[in-house]
């Protein structure tokens, strides 16, 4: 690997990946949390039970989440065009990743909330707490540790999705590894990208595990 030539391009690619992943985690984490809470709260017999809303949210997630991401990019093309004004580039690709991340995290949020002890929620309801107060003071704090671990898993999934950014002209480490490594038979480039990704994932996993342990001790 010619570091003098490819070194600056490698760090530029790393910056592109960081940009895409950071925005996707913020947007996907926020909307995924909102949708996941909506799924949990509107389930039959729950705090804000609403069969219609629950069915709509559930069907949307069930339809979109299993679609392979490369196909999802093409499927969402018309929507991406309306929202970002284009169907290629880093902004367009980040939008698609954010939508997919929202669907994935919403299901993780719902599953973690469903696993909570119903007695805790019932006790709060018996004390006259409003649904939104229960969400703030009971549901989210009780599920905080698994939610942190779920968010850590989301980070790894988003980083994985970002690897195919080159298909939409978004660049990133995946595109760099393919163009300058695989296509040029320069395995040193591919190895360097793999090392960066593995190190980042391990650091984030350690951080997520540490935060989850702290949340459990509260």
Image (cartoon, helix red, strand yellow):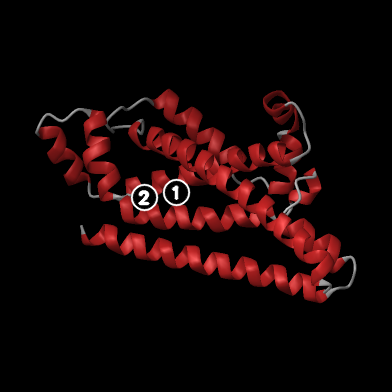
Residue beneath the point at 36% across and 37% down = 40
Secondary structure category for the residue under label 1: helix
Where is residue 182 drawn, in percent x and y? 84, 68
Q: Residue furthest front?
A: 4
Tell whether 91 sits left or right of 9: left
Q: Is residue 53 above or below residue 166?
A: above
The quadrant the C terminus occupies is bottom left
- Work out how far the residue at label 2 is from the one at label 1, CA to CA, in angstroms: 6 Å
Where is residue 131 drawn, in percent x and y? 24, 29
Residue beneath the point at 78% across and 37% down = 88
Residue beneath the point at 22% across and 35% down = 134
Where is residue 208 drawn, in percent x and y? 41, 61
Tell whether 120 sits left or right of 95: left
Q: Is residue 119 above or below residue 213?
A: above
Callout 2 crowding tier (Cα within 10 Å): few <14, some 14–19, many ≥20: many
In the foreground, 76 or 11: 11
Q: Are marks 2 and 1 in contact (CB under 8 Å)?
A: yes
Where is residue 13 drawn, in percent x and y? 72, 56
Q: Badge 2 is on which residue?
A: 112
Q: Badge 1 is on which residue?
A: 108
Residue beneath the point at 46% across and 38% down = 30
Tell whether 190 sits left or right of 94: right
In the foreground, 197 or 115: 197
**Residue 85 falls in image quadrant:** top right
Callout 1 crowding tier (Cα within 10 Å): few <14, some 14–19, many ≥20: many
In the foreground, 200 or 42: 200
The quadrant the N terminus occupies is bottom right
In the foreground, 59 or 207: 207
**Residue 173 falls in image quadrant:** bottom right
Secondary structure category for the residue under label 2: helix
């Amino acid at each position: 690997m010619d570091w003098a030539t490819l070194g600056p391009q490698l760090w530029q690619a790393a910056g592109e990946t960081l940009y895409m992943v950071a925005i996707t985690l913020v947007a996907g984490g926020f909307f995924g949390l909102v949708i996941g809470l909506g799924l949990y709260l509107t389930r039959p017999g729950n705090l804000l039970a609403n069969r219609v809303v629950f069915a709509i949210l559930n069907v949307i997630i069930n339809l979109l989440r299993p679609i392979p991401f490369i196909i999802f990019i093409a499927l969402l093309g018309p929507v991406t065009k309306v929202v970002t004004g284009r169907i290629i580039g880093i902004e367009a690709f980040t939008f698609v990743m954010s939508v997919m991340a929202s669907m994935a995290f919403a299901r993780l949020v719902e599953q973690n909330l469903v696993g909570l002890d119903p007695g805790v929620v019932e006790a709060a309801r018996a004390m006259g707490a409003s649904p939104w107060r229960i969400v703030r003071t009971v549901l989210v704090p009780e599920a905080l540790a698994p939610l942190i671990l779920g968010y850590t898993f989301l980070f790894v999934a988003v980083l994985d999705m970002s690897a195919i950014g080159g298909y939409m002209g978004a660049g990133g480490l995946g595109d760099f590894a393919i163009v300058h490594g695989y296509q040029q038979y320069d395995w040193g480039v591919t190895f360097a990208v793999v090392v960066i990704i593995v190190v980042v994932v391990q650091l984030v996993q350690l951080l997520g595990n540490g935060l989850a342990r702290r949340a459990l001790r509260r």
